[in-house]
Image (spheres, grey):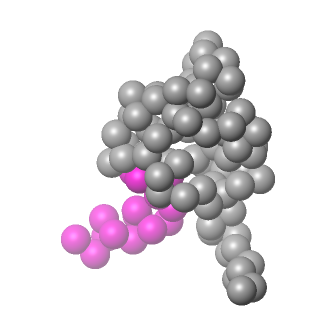
C-alpha cells in the first residue's frame, strides 16, 4: 500500500501539534512523558519535531492524557488558522 504524500497544510498542522506538545511538556523530560504515554521517546521526538506529522489517534490520545490535555484543546490548538477564520465567517 502506498501512502499519499502529505499536503503542506497537513505538515503545518503536524508542526503546530509538535509545538503544542513541547510547550505542554514544560520542564518534564521527553523520556518521562513518552513513558507515561506508553510510546517511545523516539516517537515523541519525531512528533515534536514534525517528522511524524500524522500520529495515530491512540498515540495522540495517550500523549494528551499524559500531559493533562483534552482532545478538544488539541484539536482547537492544531486547527488551521485559515480554516478557523473561514468557519467563523460562515457562521
The residue located at (61%, 31%) in the rendering is: 34
| Quarter of the image where the N terminus is located | bottom right
- Quadrant of the rendered structure where residue 18 is? top right
Across and down, in percent, residue 67 comes to 46, 28
Viewer-nearest residue: 81 or 53: 53
- Residue 12 seen in the figure: no
Q: In the displayed structure, does residue 16 sit left or right of residue 67?
A: right
Q: In the displayed structure, does residue 3 sit left or right of residue 9?
A: right
Q: In the displayed structure, does residue 85 sit left or right of residue 11?
A: left
Viewer-nearest residue: 71 or 56: 56
Across and down, in percent, residue 44 comes to 67, 39
Considering every residue shown, the one lying at the far top of the view is: 27
The residue located at (28%, 75%) in the rendering is: 90
Viewer-nearest residue: 76 or 39: 39
Above or below — where is 89 with respect to 53?
below
Q: Is residue 86 magenta?
A: yes
Q: Which residues are magenta?
A: 75-91
Q: Is residue 14 magenta?
A: no
- Quadrant of the rendered structure where residue 14 is? bottom right
Q: Main secondary structure of the magenta part?
A: helix
Above or below — where is 73 with respect to 51?
above
The residue located at (66%, 18%) in the rendering is: 29
Q: In the displayed structure, does residue 4 sit left or right of residue 81?
A: right
Viewer-nearest residue: 37 or 89: 37
Above or below — where is 77 with respect to 66?
below
Amino acid at each position: 500500500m502506498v501512502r499519499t504524500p502529505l499536503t503542506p497544510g497537513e505538515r503545518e498542522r503536524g508542526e503546530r501539534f509538535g509545538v503544542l506538545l513541547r510547550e505542554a511538556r514544560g520542564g518534564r523530560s521527553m523520556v518521562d512523558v513518552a513513558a507515561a504515554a506508553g510510546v517511545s521517546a523516539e516517537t515523541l521526538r519525531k512528533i515534536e519535531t514534525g517528522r511524524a506529522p500524522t500520529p495515530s489517534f491512540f498515540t495522540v490520545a495517550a500523549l494528551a492524557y499524559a500531559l493533562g490535555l483534552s482532545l478538544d484543546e488539541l484539536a482547537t490548538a492544531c486547527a488551521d488558522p485559515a480554516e478557523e477564520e473561514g468557519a467563523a465567517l460562515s457562521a
